[in-house]
Image (cartoon, coloured by chain):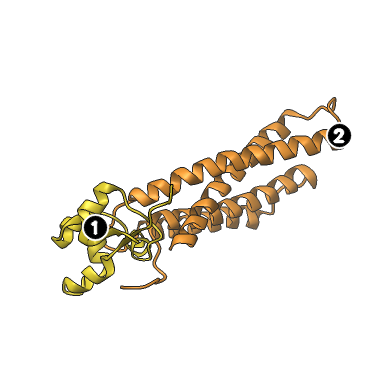
Chain colours: A orange, B yellow
Amino acid sequence: MDGREANVNRIQKISVFGIVMGVLIMLSLSYVFLTLFHFKVFLPRATARILPLILFTFMGLGIFWIRKKQSPAEPVSDERDDNIQRTAAVAAFVGTLIIWGIVLLLLTILVGVDFNIPLWAVTLGSAAMGEVALTIYLAAILIQYGRAG
Amino acid sequence: MKELVIRNNIRRLRFEHSEMTQQELADKVGITRQTVIALEAEKYVPSVALAFRIAICFGVPFEEVFFVAK
């Protein structure tokens, strides 16, 4: 049980699961939105059945993997995990602000300040920024573990 | 002011205590094995409370586990 073995703790597992799940959900939502609103057709019946099945199966397997402990006494998190999560939260906050600023700046340059956007675009944009914040948070956690083992 | 480099003898003490595994030490002091790995690699400096818990676990004085590098 010595050395740098492949085992990871619960916070690392949650981070990996969160990133993969986030990517899967974003891909699925993009597919659904494109099909319904851009191509203006209904989803094929098989896809509408298989897509949630894949997502829920993956979610179930992920939760099982996360709940599997390295030992019965393993804590959910310890002081180092808490420090890492605090730093990651700051990184996510700062990173999201920077990205949000860049997006607004680019939009201003590209379409001007008087351009109107529909409400659904604001909703989608907010959801996208939430996903960006979550991804930065989870990536910052993994990077910190990666650096220190 | 020069930064203190805090080192430790955790790995040696584990082997001197019936070759205790990292997981056993982690379970005894209430941390994850990854934190034990980071401590032994001296990539993480623990809080005073955790440092004392480790010393108590080995039954040795605090300064035998943690010391300042010269």
Q: Position of residue B15 (x, y in %)?
A: 22, 74
User: Is the Cβ of the residue at disc 2 closer than 8 Å to that at disc 1?
Assistant: no
Q: Position of residue A3 (x, y in %)?
A: 36, 73
**Residue at the extreme left:** B59
Residue bearing mark 1? A73
Q: Residue at x 35, y 54 (%)?
A: B45
Q: Residue at x 28, y 57 (%)?
A: A74
Residue bearing mark 2? A111
User: Relative to residue A37, is residue A20 depicted above or below?
Assistant: below
- Give the alpha-carbon distance from disc 2 to disc 1, as whole Å: 57 Å
User: Relative to residue A7, is residue A78 depicted above or below?
Assistant: above
Relative to A94, B46 lies left or right: left
User: Relative to residue B12, is residue A69 depicted above or below?
Assistant: above
The secondary element bearing badge 2 is classed as helix
Q: Quadrant of residue B23?
A: bottom left
Q: Position of residue A51 (x, y in %)?
A: 59, 55
Residue situated in front as seen by the camera: A38 or A45: A38
The secondary element bearing badge 1 is classed as loop
